[in-house]
Every structure is written in structure tokens, then in C-alpha cells.
Amino acid sequence: GTEAIAELEVRFDGLVRRDGGGRIARDAGRIRFARMPVDQDGQEVGYFDELVTEPVAGSGLQPVWLTVEVPADAEPGIYTGVLRISGGRGAEARVPVELNISRFTLPRPDEYRAFLDVIHSPDTISEFYDLPLYSDEHFDRMIPSLRKLGRLGSQTLYITAVRRTHFGNEHAMLQFRNESGRLVPDFTAVDRYLDLYREHVGTPRRIVLQVWTVDMDAREKSTSIRLTQVHPDGRLSSIEQPIYGQAGTEELWRRVVQGLNERVEARGWSPESITLGIGADRRPHRDHVAFFNRIAPDWKWTMFTHARGDPRPRDGRLTINDMRVGFRVLPDVPRMNLPLGDRIAGGWQEGFLQLSSLRAYFTERSHPATFYTAMSKATRGQWGGLGRVGLDFWPRQGTTNARPLSLMTRFRTNNVLDINLMRDNPRIMTVQGDHGALGTVRLEMLRQGRQLNEARIVIEAALTDDDHRTALGAEWERAAREALERHLAAIEIGNRSWEWYVGFDWLNDAMTLYDLASIADEHR
């Protein structure tokens, strides 16, 4: 076998622009070390993915990851430097590093035009670190997960209002307390979470209040809902309350609606971003829909569905029977028709937000190249982005049907035929570290592909705007069309696989798109 590396040290001294016109300081670089995941039996799975801060002890092969955060004032150009690597025997390897900074400037991640829906599990963090749910320590341990959502540019915020949903939550984030015999909503945990989200992720485009589960779809099946009561000492307990529309429920839930609207507005967010969740192939009962139409007339529903028999969106709106839909995710994989011709624009320009979960296109163990292409694959035709991807639903002990068990499987509210949270999709893109979630190669590749997809959208927007396209000129248009055709064809050839990566000059492809997007921005 390979001899173990001893006392590995890696140093980064910064970068200098090739023409001597600028520098990037060493503290802009972040060094991490990749290690292999282990399966349920503790065996290494055979590929490097988990990114940790210290070298892996006893390893004979140690991949090193250098991530450079480009300063906002860095001049475009090619920067060079070295990584100094030593293994404890006096010899030092000097590995050349080259960084090509484009003139294109990305927007803030929470302002990206393509939509990304990555789901964080507060309950998993509580269980894996053995922390009281929504305690100070629990909120602190969630911060690494939220930071990763922010770096990815995820744009959904989930709040559980009922217990035992398909998120696997034993208790809800929105809780209730007893005031002189009357139940009232308690937003203490919600307030903390909204503040952390604003600080580490940004402004959500959709806020999903989870009020429904698949076992609540008919009155004859359920006359009550499962809520969480918080006691004066902070203890949480389970309570059953009448289901929506029964006596006394309207006053209680009007308080919920008013309270959440006020909190969203106080943070500078739009109350129109609030949706109810999550409808599926099995839909909320019409009486429950009517109840929320009455008490929250500006709120719509979030759907995860095959949409069989549903009407098409019209004028940027979708209503199914009396259910107004704010956005929906379908498991279908968008198709690409090549050559593009005039079918250039992806779903980022659609009035109604519809996402793909890219079901079976990628899972936890897909090749990193598949994560790199996911956003471009999901933003085509009438599709506005990627949805229902898990961040940190880490597997528990045991397996079922060769799939790891996570919190989402512990209650019978994650029905495979209705609202399976992430069937044949990634449930995790992080791993458990000592103080919270750690990143992975897959997460970095999704982030990198998401950034490139924003450049692609800038090009598409220019090509579909007559005045903008004319101002850019025929030469830019020809180059842009050729670049888009080449980029999307490579992704289509590599559908459900990664072989395209071997023979495709993906670095040059990315720089070409960034440079074309930069020119489009300059002439906007």
C-alpha cells in the first residue's frame, strides 16, 4: 500500500497578477483537505468528497483544495502563485497555482436570477449534536449550514408550523403557548431563525410555512393537527388541536398569519414571498384551502408534484381548483432541443416560478461534474431552476431499500407516492464536523456551476432583448450563440453521466461565457 504521509503542511502565500499590476493576499485563500466518506459499515467508499480543515491522519494520498475568495476590488487578469507542501521530511513541493479573474461581476448570491431550493434540516443538527431543540447552542450549531446556503445562493426559507411533517421534525419551529387558558402563537424560535437566515443567507425569494402533511388531506382521516407547545421553562410538548376550519381555529391562525407577515415586513422582506406548504400529488383538502384563502388572502401554496391533469400557468399565475400556487417543483428533467435556434431563453424569465428536482439525474454519490452541470440543466425552457435538494439530512444508523435512513423517514408523512422529500436526489451535500456542517466537493461544484449559470443568463437576456443585442453587434451575437450551443450540447451529451467532462475543455468554456457576459453587462 501507499506509505502514510507524515506531518503534512500546506502554505499559501497569495497571488500576483502576471503583469505585476495587482496582488491577492494570502488570507483570501482557504486550504482544505479532501477525505473519503465511509459507508454504514465504516468502510471508505472509494472517492474523495468531504472537505475538512486538517490533513487526514494515516492517509497515503491527500488531495488538497485551495479556494480563493476574489476581493471585490481585484483587477481582472491572470494571477499566479504557489502552494508550498511539505510532508515532514525536509523536502518541500512547490505546486504552481493560476487564477484567471474575469471582468464579469456576479450579483449577490441571494439576487441570482435562476432559483435554487436547498433544504436545511434544523432537527438533524439538534439530533446529531445532542442539543436541545432551538436552544442557544442549537442555533449556534446551525450557522455553518446556513452559511453554506448563503454561499450557494439558496433562496427558500422553511418554517415548520406542525409536528411530524415529511421533514422529520418531532417538534415545530413555530410554537404555541398557553396564556390564561388560551393558546397563542410563540414566534421566539422563528425570530431567531429569521435573523440568522438574514445574516448568513440573505433575502429569501420564497418562505414556506409548513402547515400540511399527507395524512391531513381529508376530514374523515383527520380532525386534528399536531402542534408544539412551549412551556415557561422552555420545555416543549406535543398537543393536538382542531384542524383548520373547526371552531376556534380561525382566531388562532389569524394570529399566526398576522405575526408572520409583521416579522417578514420588519426585516425588509416581501410578505408576498410567504407560501403554505407543501402540496403534493395528494392535495390539501378543499376546506383547508378555503380556510387559508379566507384568513391569508395574499398567501399561496408551494407544490411538489407530477402536475398530472393540472392546468398550465397563465399570465404568470397558477390556480388549481381554488388553490393559488406560489411556486412548484416537478421531478421531471428538462429536455434540451439542439440546435438552439431561437429557443435561447431559459425559465429564468418566466412569470410563474417552476423548478425541476432533476429526479434521478444526480444523487449523493454522483460524479462532481454532474453537480457542476445541475443548474444549467435545470434552467431550460419553462424551468426556472433547481429544487428539493437536501443540505444536511445526514443518515442515521441502519438502511432501508439500500438507502440510508435520515430524519425524513421516521414518520409516515414522507409517502413515496406523494411527497417523498428527495427521492433519487441528494439528501446531503455536507458532513458532520465538530462544530457544524462541513462542505464537500459536490457542494463546491454545485456552487461553481450555479455561478456560471448566472453568466449564461446574462448572455441569454442580451440575446433576447432586441435593443441590447443590436447594441452588442453581430460579432458578439455570433460568438454568444456558438458558446451557448457548445455549453448546452456538452451538458446534454453528459445527461445522467459525466463522460462529457473527460473530453470537454470546461475551463475555457467557463471563461468564454464569463467574458461574453462581461461584455453584455458593459453595454447594458
Image: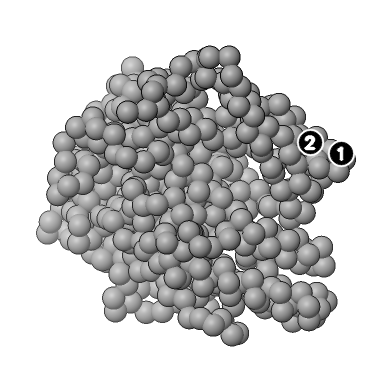
Residue 105 visible in the picture: yes
Spot occupied by residue 133 in the image (x, y as percentages of width and height): 34, 27
Q: Residues within 10 Å of mark 1 (few under 14, many from 20)?
A: few
User: In what element is the residue under mark 2?
Assistant: strand
- Left or right of 397, for residue 92: right
Pointers 2 and 1 in contact (C-beta within 8 Å): yes
Label disc, if present, on residue 155 of the rendered structure: none
User: Which residue type carries mark 2?
Assistant: Val
Q: Which residue is mark 1?
A: 20
Name the residue carrying label 2. 16
- The residue furthest left is 220
Residue lying at 73% horizontally and 39% vertically, measured from the top left: 80
Q: Residue at x 69, y 42 (%)?
A: 98
Residue 184: percent from left, percent from top: 36, 36
Counting from the top left corner in percent of width and height, residue 387 is at 42, 57
- Please tell me which residue is depicted at 15% across the width and 53% down the height of the picture: 222
